[in-house]
Image (cartoon, rainbow, N blue to C red):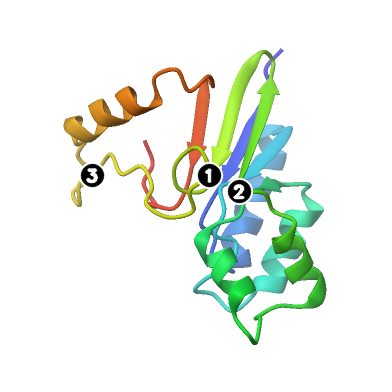
Amino acid sequence: MSHKIGLLSDVHARPDPVEEALAIFAHEGVRLILCGGDIAGYGDELDETVALLRQSACRGVLGNHDQWTLDQADNAGSVSTLHYLRTLPLARSFIVEGVYVYLVHASPPLATMGGIRLLDENGRLISEHLAQWYKRLAGFGHDVLVVGHTHQIF
């Protein structure tokens, strides 16, 4: 049986791309939706973005922009949105069809800053970085690692 997982990250309070992704996930029969953090950020529609994630039963983690939003004296969001952000863990671990999946915003085990940067500004693999991360993650104990933060796909 194939268990499809939908991945989102760094949506930065912009509901339109989230809506688009959720439509694709629904069409493709995605059964589990994960968000790698930074739900808050540059956009100004945080309440709408959080509402979409809640409706989809998305399981997310706290990102640096989410933490900054919570730390602001004049929080930019409704009470329910801020409650949602406060409930996000720093990391999540799942077993999906015998596969161990770990979700964190920037880098394991619990970082919201820094991140795993494997590509240069032209999108080329930096093999030294890849080798460093292979070494650093040896024995980590998960089959799949999902991170956001760097806005890189690899």
Question: Which one is in front, 35 or 137?
Answer: 137
Residue shown at the point (48%, 23%) measured from the top left:
140
Instruction: Indicate the quadrant containing the N terminus: top left, top right, bottom left or bottom right.
Output: top right
Residue shown at the point (65%, 87%) measured from the top left:
74
Q: Amino acid at mark 1?
A: Leu
What SS does tag 2 mark?
Answer: loop
> Closer to the N terminus: mark 1 or mark 3?
1
Q: Quadrant of residue 75?
A: bottom right
Q: Which residue is mark 2?
A: 90
> Closer to the N terminus: mark 3 or mark 2?
2
Q: CA distance from mark 3 to mark 2?
A: 28 Å
Q: Amino acid at mark 3?
A: Gly
Horizontal side, residue 107 vs residue 46: left or right:
left
Residue 138 spot, x, y in % from top left: 39, 19
Q: Quadrant of residue 132?
A: top left
What SS does tag 3 mark?
Answer: loop
Q: CA distance from mark 1 to mark 2?
A: 6 Å
Mark 1 surroundings within 10 Å by alpha-carbon count, few (fewer than 14), some (14 through 19), many (20 or more): some
Q: CA distance from mark 1 to mark 3?
A: 26 Å
Image disc number at residue 110: 1
Tags 1 and 2 touching, CB below 8 Å: yes
Instruction: Indicate the quadrant containing the C terminus: top left, top right, bottom left or bottom right.
Output: top left
Mark 2 surroundings within 10 Å by alpha-carbon count, few (fewer than 14), some (14 through 19), many (20 or more): many
> Closer to the N terminus: mark 1 or mark 2?
2
Horizontal side, residue 98 vs residue 139: left or right:
right
What SS does tag 1 mark?
Answer: loop
